[in-house]
Amino acid sequence: MPTPDPSRRFHPASAPDYVPADQLRGLQLERLQRIVRRAYERVPLFRTRCQERQVSPADLRSLEDLARFPFTLKTDLRDTYPFGLFASPMDEIVRLHASSGTTGKPTVVAYTQGDLDVWTEVMVRSFAACGLHRGDVVQNAYGYGLFTGGLGAHYGAEALGATVIPISGGNTDRQIMVLQDFAVTAICCTPSYFLHLVERAKEMGSDFSRLRAGIFGAEPWSEAMRRRIEADTGVKAYDIYGLSEIIGPGVGIECFAQSGLHVFEDHFYPEVVDPASGEVLPDGAEGELVLTTLSKDAMPMIRYRTRDVTSLIPEPCACGRTIRRIRRIGRRSDDMFIIRGVNVFPSQVETALLAVEGTLPHYQIVLSREKGLDEMEVKVEVTPEVFSDQIRALEALQHKLEQSLDHTLGIRARVTLVGPRTIQRSEGKAKRVIDQRQI
Amino acid sequence: MKLTQLSLFLENRPGALRLPCQVLGQAGIDILSMSLADTQQFGILRIVVKDSDRARKVLEEAGSVVKATDVLAVEVPDRAGGLADMLGAFEGSGLSIEYIYPLAAGHRGKTAVLLLRVEDPERAAQLLQARKVRVLSREQAFEAVGA
């Protein structure tokens, strides 16, 4: 007799996942009206933008009316650094997180106790969707600290009733020892780090046959990578989605069907828009994911442009959840990439190169993964202006470029000098980013 | 007094050296002397040819990054201590030599011709001449290698 899939076991916290669609829409509208009003009354930037577009919270009579409201951009967080988008006084804010900044300043996000409770709730629902429950031993290898991954997963797993091991990131050999000795059944980390753990565990002759689920996120990964993880380890690999501007991990999660990520849309209202025009696209059409927080008080995000490209899947899921799914995110609508958790735009790389050379050389960014860690290489074509007959002058140039990149991006990149016209150009334009991290 | 040296950027990969050499060969340009400096990542090929303007042109047309630098051709007696004597000219001058490679190897008891790359070739030439070291003209240098 086949054993029933444990992920089918119902967890009470998951009740909102199964609310009938019309009831869900009613709840969404009610929450949306409240949060838009809150942002309008308390966040000057949002109010000004609404006034420019001549919309006010009173215009929000249906969910479709949301399309009339202005977007919020990542740059808005930076421009109002640190607390400019907060809608709660500091004495109601109990937690701050910050994303690693790429231009010096990080972006700061805030939570009231109620916001943290929402976060914990969606993380419980996430773990439950992956079939975890009381009795599971969860090794949380997301970084603890300003990054939302560690604490988000931590409180969620604890509230679920699982045993949490707050090991945080790094120290691979210790991770493997704990995985084996503590009979860990589920792990939270980036998928690439998990592959690194698996490789190292093989070398060490370690066995973690008790491990049955991996909750993998914080970086894009492919179906091929999932197949490899599952075939090599027997661990079921779930994709979790989130971003600190919205709440952190727990915006969406795969269920056992592994066919798109359920968005907890009673808390995060999804739209998919045309990245160029900003027009809302119908369900099923591919575009940029835009999210509105429906129940976050400290920092409501109205129509936040995630730059992640996906589509909404309106069809019901095999798991019975009524909340809609988004397709797995494979790319972004801009040319931004994420390396070691840091958002990087090629334009920032250009700024760094320009600062050293005076003119912009042809360059290419190559992203790779070594031992589970992202590596960034910038290939720079040597120009007659900077070329020297002396080795040390070229090495000094290389060093200066690396320093400039480190200074601008806040992460270390390796600079390789390459010959002129060796970087491939298509239609005269070089392909700026080669991402070899997809496994 | 000075010779023009051409330097080329080379990537550190198989075939990188042959390409510019082929280009020069096809243009009928003879390499009189060369030196190859390498690092883990890249290399620099330094060459001396008779018609450096034309060499530079064909190399650049073939896609190379080329830099022209002045070097001094210095005659050194080919005997024990010959090089040390020549270098004595720079003692106390604060002038440092970037690199040296031979243009023409001598025969024991005769003279060798070395190419010197220094930051300030004029001053270096003065110092050498004050030490009675012969600094060759272009023509003399080419003659030394039978070009």
Image (cartoon, coloured by chain):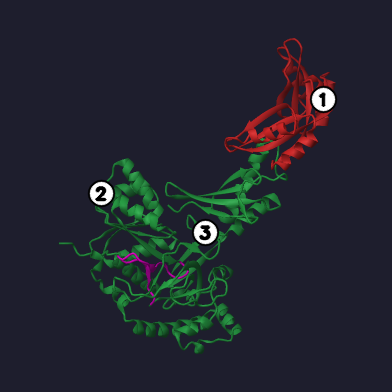
Chain colours: A green, B red
Labels 2 and 3: the sequence-earlier one: 2
Q: Position of residue B135 (x, y in %)?
A: 82, 23
| Disc 2 and disc 1 on one polypeptide chain | no
**Left or right position of B15 against A3:** right
The foreground one among A303 and A118 is A303
**Left or right position of A373 against A277:** left
Subunit of mark 1? B
- Residue B127's tag is 1
The amino acid type, in three-letter code, at marker 3 is Phe
Q: Position of residue A165 (x, y in %)?
A: 31, 56
Q: Does any portion of residue A87 appear in the rendered image?
A: yes
Q: Residue at x 59, y 47 (%)?
A: A379
Q: Which stretch did the figure color magenta? A: A244-265
The quarter of the picture where the N terminus of chain A appears is bottom left
- Residue A337's tag is 3
Magenta-drawn stretch contains A93: no
Q: Position of residue A249 (x, y in %)?
A: 40, 65
| Disc 1 and disc 3 on one polypeptide chain | no
Magenta-drawn stretch contains A256: yes
Question: Which element type, helix, strand or loop, lies under badge 2?
Answer: helix
Question: Which element type, helix, strand or loop, lies under badge 3?
Answer: strand
Residue located beneath label 2 in the image = A181
Please identify the quarter of the rendering in which residue B68 is found: top right
Mark 2 to mark 3: distance in Å?
A: 37 Å
Position of residue B42 relative to residue A120, above or below, is above
Disc 2 + disc 3, Cβ < 8 Å: no
Q: How many residues crowd around disc 3 within 10 Å: few (fewer than 14), some, or many (20 or more)? A: some
Mark 1 to mark 3: distance in Å?
A: 57 Å
Subunit of mark 3? A
Q: Residue at x 62, y 43 (%)?
A: A418
Q: Residue at x 33, y 76 (%)?
A: A322
